[in-house]
């Protein structure tokens, strides 16, 4: 992820959180099509660019907002499962927030 996002400053702890989000989708039986490594790159880039434009540091709220957008398009849930509820639960569990 860092090699594909070299122009942005994300800390090691933030990158770990992004990778943890993607890893959770890959290991959850409720997810039919999990997120790929490209999704983690997308989350990192989007969060970093948004923070840069707003003139603030990347925080968990920014990561959650980026993850909601990227993962909302990247994952496919098994029938009968809500993607929105799954993502909200995942974001709160990993980041402590579902975003703004």
Image (cartoon, rainbow, N blue to C red):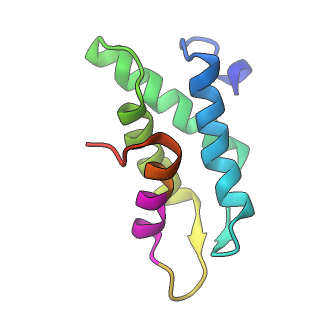
5 sits left or right of 56 in the view:
right
Q: Quadrant of the C terminus?
A: top left
The answer to whether residue 63 is above or below residue 50 is below
Q: Nearer the viewer, residue 85 or 42?
A: 85
The answer to whether residue 95 is above or below residue 5 is below
Q: Nearer the viewer, residue 25 or 76?
A: 25
Q: Identify which residue is drawn at 68% across, 68% down.
A: 33
Q: Identify which residue is drawn at 48% across, 45% down.
A: 67
Q: Nearer the viewer, residue 29 or 48?
A: 29
Q: Position of residue 55 (x, y in %)?
A: 29, 11
Q: Nearer the viewer, residue 67 or 94?
A: 94
Is-magenta flag for residue 69? no
Magenta-drawn stretch, dominant element (helix, strand or loop) = helix
Q: Identify which residue is drawn at 64% across, 71% down.
A: 31
Q: Identify which residue is drawn at 41% across, 58% down.
A: 88
User: Which quadrant of the figure has residue 60?
Assistant: top left
Q: Position of residue 8 (x, y in %)?
A: 54, 14
Q: Which residues are magenta?
A: 82-89
Is-magenta flag for residue 83? yes
Q: Position of residue 5 (x, y in %)?
A: 62, 20
Q: Quadrant of the N terminus?
A: top right
Residue 83 showing in the rendered view: yes
User: Which quadrant of the figure has residue 38?
Assistant: top right
The number of discs equals 0
User: Which quadrant of the figure has residue 7?
Assistant: top right
Residue sticking out furthest to the bottom: 80
Residue 35 showing in the rendered view: no
């Amino acid at each position: 992820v860092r090699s594909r996002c070299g122009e942005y400053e994300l800390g090691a702890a933030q990158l770990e959180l992004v990778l943890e989000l993607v890893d959770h989708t890959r290991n959850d039986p409720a997810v039919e099509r999990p997120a790929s490594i490209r999704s983690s790159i997308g989350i990192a880039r989007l969060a970093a660019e948004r923070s840069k434009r707003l003139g603030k540091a990347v925080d968990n709220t920014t990561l959650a907002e980026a993850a909601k957008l990227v993962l909302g398009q990247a994952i496919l849930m098994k029938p009968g499962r809500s993607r929105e509820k799954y993502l909200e639960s995942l974001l709160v569990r990993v980041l402590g927030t579902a975003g703004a």
